[in-house]
Image: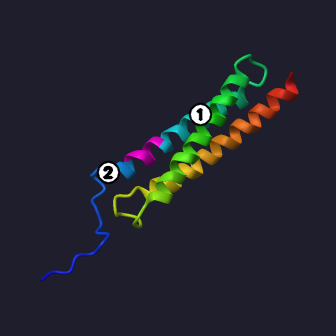
Amino acid sequence: MSVHLLSEPLAAAYLTPGRLWSLVAALAGVIGVIAGGFALARLRSGTTRRAAIVALTAGLSGMAGGGFVVAAAEGGPGTGYGIVGGFVALVIGSLAAILGWLALSRARRAV
């Protein structure tokens, strides 16, 4: 009789649903960081407000997706639940939301 662990490590080559969700959330955060950087770089342009809103929305979406993955994970790192990617998505999404908020507040003052 063999003993099976509840959370066995899963190779990183496998794309599980948890890892997929954390990748999607992290990608939303990266899109938000890029949009926030463009919005901060172009403070006098007409697209600043739109880019800031995109950054804020993408950042909040990345944070929500990362939080969902972390909350739903039943195991630690290496188990295939995507908990590490969820934490990465939370950090990147937070950064994107901060950049979007900062660009939006600066765009309002510039008008």
Q: Residue at x 74, y 38 (%)?
A: 101
Specify the label residue 34 is tagged with. 1
The quadrant in which the C terminus is found is: top right
Disc tally is 2
Q: Residue furthest left?
A: 1
Q: Quadrant of residue 11?
A: bottom left
| Quadrant of the frame with the N terminus | bottom left
Disc sitting over residue 16 in the figure = 2
Dot 1 lies on which element? helix
Indicate the quadrant where residue 107 lies: top right
Question: What amino acid type should be assigned to the residue bearing mark 2?
Answer: Thr
Q: Which mark is residue 11?
A: none
Horizontal side of 90 relative to 48 (left or right) equals: left
Would you say 104 lies left or right of 90 here? right
Q: At 35% from the left edge and 63% from the top edge, which residue is drawn?
A: 78
The x and y percentages for residue 98 are 70, 43
Q: What residue span does the magenta drawing correspond to?
A: 20-24
| Residue found 57% across the figure and 51% down from its top | 90
